[in-house]
Amino acid sequence: MNLEDIKRIKGLLSTPQRIAIIPHKNPDGDAIGSTLGLWHYLNNMGQNATIVSPNDAPKFLKWMPGSDKILNFEVENSQAVRVLKEATLIFTLDFNHLGRVGQMQSNLEEATAEFIMIDHHQEPSDYALVTYSDVTMSSTCEMVYNFINFLGDTDKITAEMANCLYAGIMTDTGSFKFSSTTSTTHRIVADLIDRGAKNTYIHNVVFDTNSPSRLHLLGCALKNMVILEDYATAYITLSQEELDTYNYKKGDTEGFVNYGLTLDGIRFAVIFIENKEEGIIKISFRSEGDFSVNEFARAHFQGGGHHNAAGGKSDVSLKETEEYFVSLLPKYKNDINQL
Ligand code: 5GP
Ligand code: MN
């Protein structure tokens, strides 16, 4: 953000606004952590802010202070629609184009509010009055910390905010190991701990609250893994029937895709998850090195994301999606194997 943007935002926040804060559909730790961090900050300064999420968040994020106040567009629809209609300012966090909010897209397009985008995904759309976009950032939570810092309010970061922001940085950096983790990220995380983030507790509630059925589903996923050594690729499929067998709950497949990359010599890992209700196959892509899964997802699977972590979807069957994916690999063999 440049000085002009900071002045503009200070001006807007110097008068009472009706504010809506929006995470992307199927919100992850960074989406929920950043929206809640900002929500606490704005409400603490006397603003009237509400988070409207396109759909529900997974259970392992619901310990975050304030998460029970998030409006779910799918469930509390009329209230959510009213908040969006009456908003004077809308913050969109952790996504780069309005298509990422699913059914809520038309409500955002029709809203009369000014928009502020805070996001770290590639190729941001141009819909906001202020676009704070930085693809080098580890997480949107790190950017919300910066945003508060730009406004001169670092000292107003409470323990509640620190816990939310820590959680998002932790999940989006794969517990501080992805290449987006910088020394600055660590300094910010250290400051958040000083301000009250309970780091050990957060690791525990996010990662160590498995249910037996989730571990069984992981077993099924790992058994289904196909390893294509020639293409340094490993992919997993999970059918709706398999999800049902293991009593799938939202968030249960989080992190499964990363197992492929733990194999020696594997540089491209993918998971295909059938969703009968939506009639799609939801896909997650992960890579190591120069191969851009953002470009791959954009080119072939209606998606996008980051250089080494992206998502997308397919409208044909699980089997056809798998076949199509495998047929693409020869073209990318060199890119994937390149060090
Ligand atoms: P995940 O695989 O964990 O769902 O997502 C990995 C990254 O890709 C995240 O930053 C996420 O926001 C982004 N992403 C996931 N699905 C999609 C999608 O369908 N479209 C776009 N543009 N990005 C996605
Ligand atoms: Mn993120």
Image (cartoon, grey):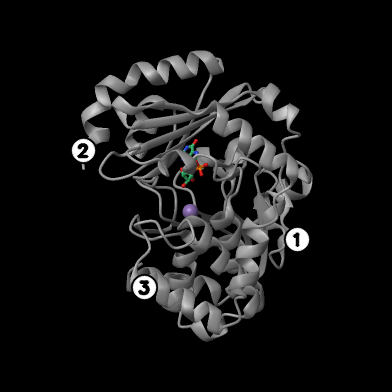
Look at the image and tell me in which quarter the C terminus lies.
top left
Q: Between residues 306 and 96, which one lies in front from this camera angle?
A: 306
Image coordinates for residue 70, horizontal then vertical, percent: 72, 57
Q: For this view, does 296 lie left or right of residue 39?
A: left
The three-letter code of the residue at mark 2 reads: Gln
User: Does residue 46 appear in this view?
Assistant: no
Q: Earlier in the sequence, mark 2 or mark 3?
A: 3
Disc 1 and disc 2: Cα gap in Å?
47 Å
Residue 11, placed above or below residue 152: above
CB of residue at label 1: within 8 Å of ligand 2? Answer: no
Q: Quadrant of residue 91?
A: bottom right
Element at label 2: loop
In this figure, which residue is indicated by the disc labeled 1?
69
Q: Residues within 10 Å of mark 2 (few under 14, many from 20)?
A: few
Q: 25 or 57: which is nearer to us?
A: 57
Please give left or right for residue 264 compared with residue 44 in the image.
left
Is 286 displayed left or right of 251 in the figure? Answer: left
Disc 2 designates what residue?
338
As displayed, is residue 299 above or below residue 315? below
For the residues marked 2 and 3, what is the alpha-carbon distance in whole angstroms?
29 Å
Tell me the tag on residue 262.
Answer: none
CA distance separating discs 3 and 1: 31 Å
